[in-house]
Amino acid sequence: MYNKTLAELSQALQQRDTSSEELTGMYLQRCRQFMDKLNCFVTLTEEHAMAQARAADKKIQAGKAGPLTGIPMVHKDIFCTNGIKTSCGSRMLDNFIAPYDATVVRQLDDAGMVMLGKTNMDEFAMGSSNETSYYGPVLNPWDPDRVPGGSSGGSAAVVAARLTPMATGTDTGGSIRQPASLCGITGLKPTYGRVSRYGMIAFASSLDQGGPMTRTAEDAALVLNAMAGFDEHDSTSANEPVEDYTSQLENPLEGLKIGLPVEYFDERLNPDISRIIHDGIAELKKLGASIHEINLPSSKLSIPVYYVVAPAECSSNLARYDGVRFGYRCDDPRDLNDLYCRSRGEGFGREVKRRVLIGTYVLSAGYYDAYYLKAQKIRRLIRNEFQQALKEVDVIIGPTAPGTAFKLNELIDDPINMYLSDIYTVSINLAGLPAISVPAGMLNGLPVGMQIIGDYFSEARLLNVAHRFQQATDWHQHQPAEYK
Ligand code: GLN
């Protein structure tokens, strides 16, 4: 049963082949069995889950169930959950019990989903390997010596290990797509503003976006139906109509124009990854798509621009953790200054401090114009180039990540190379576009993801292309041997 997709589980529940209580019990049992090995959970919410499952079963019996009613899931520990610890992977929030639910949490709760727990993540979502978490690294289910990617590494690992059919993630520069690629699952980063950020702990507010992490594009569509929508609590939430994201899944791909950015496929791309992505594109060609070369010349600046903009916003957002109102407070402060300095010094980890320092620097009076303002201008160029390209093609395809899952400790002391793991993903956040990563091949026993990027609010199209690809291939069905 744990091998079924969310869509299959939904059907099984509707046909009364199983109950939510039974499913929830089975997944909780798997979570308990594997959670220490993978270090994938910060909190397992067993009683809460069983209560939600019983309520879901009542709804099903009363004929009031929707497609997600009774389906188990997990939240990345960045989403506030009322009355439940919400740590954001940080010592700073290790003692934080959220006093309210994030909009995404409420939406999935209203849809009848059952929360099994909260997943481990890079501290404040800053990282690409899950090694910056206060709770230690998450291990990749494909190989315990390797990272699952980050920052939504716990969420990616639990879906890959079949401990849940679905997890939420957040993506500021690649944190849904890159771990999805490294763990062999499907991860969708929606258009900026499509999914509410209310109650999603802020890292870089102009880039942050929540989305679903699932086994298949069909499952992602089912979940996005519940997650998408305008929210008056989020001032950058998009007031655009919500489509039924499952309605276009089966559309044929005849006539689809695919853009291949020359810059993504240059000599720096690992030839094995290049071959896998080209094989993936060949599958789409067989389904009727045509291929067009496009140029995104400013994309080479996306990492430096991101590492000015994201730290700037992070330094501002994280100023609220001062040891006064909530979160970690140091013991016996001498005075107010000591309280601030030691609470922040002891509460934050190294990577978070590095970002706060960079951010404070680029926003300071003498450097604002030289760094922050300049970065914002290049950000606009990046966005314009994507918009131009997307007038000529329907979707843009490339790799999700430059390689497969790397070894634990391989990059943790090499921040530049760690930052480069998001080289193909950050520009999409800078532009605010939607993109999905789907499993597209295997390299030395490790999964490789292919990224499909679309125009603003074209999630239905992306899911359609991804779904058709998954009907034609079986990469999304590969699973780590130990978790079969
Ligand atoms: N790896 C990138 C970073 O460290 C992106 C993280 C994210 O998307 N949350 O900032």
Image: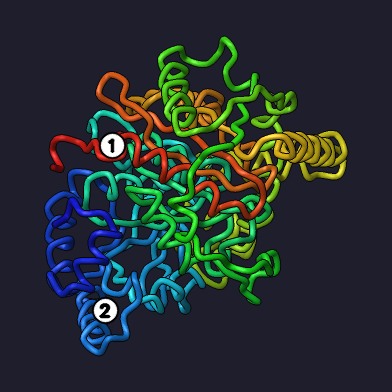
Q: Is residue 67 above or below residue 140?
A: below
Residue where numbered disc 1 is placed: 140
Q: Is residue 318 left or right of residue 121?
A: right
Q: CA distance from mark 1 to mark 2?
A: 29 Å
Name the kind of residue labelled 2 in the image.
Gln
- Secondary element under disc 1, as helix, strand or loop, is loop
Residue 306: give x, y in percent of width and height.
66, 37
Q: Secondary structure at mark 2?
A: helix
> Where's residue 351, x and y in %?
52, 40
Residue beneath the point at 47% across and 78% down: 100
Q: Is residue 349 visible?
A: no
**Residue depicted at x 80% and y 35%:** 381
Q: Is residue 398 left or right of residue 317?
A: left
Tell which of 434 and 340 is nearer to you: 434
Query: 10 Å neighbourhood of mark 1: few (<14), some, or many (≥20)?
Result: many
Considering only vertical position in the picture, is 3 above or below 369?
below
Residue corresponding to mark 2: 52
Image coordinates for residue 165, horizontal then vertical, percent: 28, 56
Quadrant of residue 239 in the image? Answer: bottom right
Location of residue 289 (image quadrant):
top right
Residue at 59% from the left image edge and 48% from the top image edge = 434
Q: Please tell me the numbered disc located at residue 252.
A: none
Q: Residues within 10 Å of mark 2 (few under 14, many from 20)?
A: many
Q: Is residue 57 visible?
A: yes
> In the depicted view, which residue is nearer to us: 331 or 288?
288
Location of the C terminus by quadrant is top left
**Quarter the N terminus occupies:** bottom left
Q: Amino acid at mark 1?
A: Asn
| Circle count | 2
- Residue 469, image x, y percentages: 41, 38
